[in-house]
């Protein structure tokens, strides 16, 4: 797949390459599920024809070998992309060392900031649940505050892009509270997923634009908030 990408094929799946490069047949393993109910598929209760499955696996292996032999081994692959695989695997193996004490400090400091802020917002907006967009939208309307955007269903949006341009104290406080809460609910839990050596192991991927992606956890989803960095350094 990486060799195909280096040759300009952005659709890096075997079916596409079999059809468009090799002109060879390709049967996905999901073919055995055609006509079966979605519920059975989700439960894994679809009977497998092992003879057919074996034939398809052989077909996939033959097509992969044919691609390897057919596609030019361009410099982008041999000099950059192929050696890069070893580096990525090493990065995944060693992981990232996370200072759990610093993370706990940031977590507690964030809780100390969000708790009074949440109380103030509930008092100012007269809402019980700040995570309820309908409640927040209605509370803002009651105060004559309308966001700059609508949702797809033509309702008042209370998202950042809608509220940030207003520059009002209450909307700015709401957006800040949301940002801090994301630290508690998204960033901190993701950084807790360490092994017994205190290292976090993510899975890196290669996107069609040539950049790296990651998952389990998604490191791109970590905050770039300078306040988060300041607290972790204190």
Image (tube, rainbow, N blue to C red):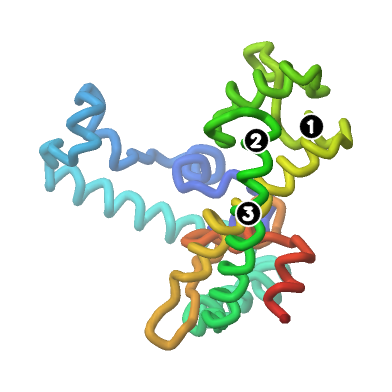
In 3D space, how far apart are the residues under numbered discs 1 and 2 (Cα atoms)? 19 Å
**Marked residue nearer the N-terminal end (3 or 1):** 3
Q: Is residue 125 visible?
A: yes
Q: In this view, does 10 lie to the left or right of 194?
A: right
In 3D space, how far apart are the residues under numbered discs 3 and 2 (Cα atoms)? 14 Å
> Residue furthest toward the top?
154
Residue shown at 68%/76% (left/top)? 232
Q: Where is residue 109 in the image (x, y as percent from the top left)?
A: 63, 68
Q: Position of residue 181 (x, y in %)?
A: 60, 51
Displayed quadrant of residue 231: bottom right
Q: How crowded is mark 1: few (under 14 residues within 10 Å), some or many (20 or more)?
A: many
In 3D space, how far apart are the residues under numbered discs 3 and 1 (Cα atoms)? 19 Å
Q: How crowded is mark 2: few (under 14 residues within 10 Å), some or many (20 or more)?
A: few
Q: Which mark is residue 114?
A: 3
Residue shown at 71%/40% (left/top)? 174
Q: Which mark is residue 175?
A: none
**Marked residue nearer the N-terminal end (3 or 2):** 3
Q: Position of residue 186 (x, y in %)?
A: 54, 55
* Of the two numbered discs 1 and 2 in the rendering, the one whose residue sits closer to the viewer: 2
Determine which residue is flagged by label 1.
163
Label 3: which secondary element: helix
Residue shown at 64%/52% (left/top)? 116
Q: Is residue 25 left or right of residue 33?
A: right
Q: Decide: is 23 above or below 95.
A: above
Determine which residue is flagged by label 2.
123
Q: Decide: is 51 above or below 155.
A: below
Q: In this view, does 37 lie to the left or right of 212?
A: left
Label 1: which secondary element: helix
Displayed quadrant of residue 172: top right
Q: In this view, does 189 lie to the left or right of 187?
A: left
Viewer-closest of 209 and 32: 209
Viewer-closest of 189 and 76: 189
């Amino acid at each position: 797949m990486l060799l195909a990408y280096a040759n300009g094929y952005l659709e890096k799946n075997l079916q596409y390459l079999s059809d468009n490069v090799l002109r060879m047949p390709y049967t996905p393993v999901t073919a055995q599920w055609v006509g079966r109910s979605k519920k059975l598929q989700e439960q894994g209760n679809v009977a497998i024809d092992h003879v057919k499955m074996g034939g398809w696996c052989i077909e996939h292996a033959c097509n992969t070998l044919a691609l390897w032999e057919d596609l030019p081994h361009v410099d982008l692959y041999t000099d950059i992309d192929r050696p890069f695989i070893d580096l990525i695997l090493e990065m995944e193996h060693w992981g990232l060392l996370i200072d759990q004490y610093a993370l706990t400090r940031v977590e507690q400091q964030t809780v100390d900031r969000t708790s009074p802020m949440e109380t103030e917002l509930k008092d100012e907006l007269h809402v019980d649940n700040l995570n309820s967009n309908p409640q927040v939208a209605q509370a803002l309307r009651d105060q004559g505050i309308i966001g700059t955007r609508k949702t797809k269903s033509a309702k008042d949006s209370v998202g950042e892009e809608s509220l940030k341009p207003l520059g009002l104290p209450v909307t700015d406080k709401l957006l800040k509270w949301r940002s801090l809460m994301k630290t508690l609910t998204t960033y901190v839990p993701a950084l807790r997923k360490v092994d017994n050596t205190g290292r976090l192991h993510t899975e890196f991927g290669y996107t069609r634009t040539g950049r790296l992606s990651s998952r389990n956890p998604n490191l791109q989803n970590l905050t770039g908030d300078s306040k988060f960095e300041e607290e972790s350094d204190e």
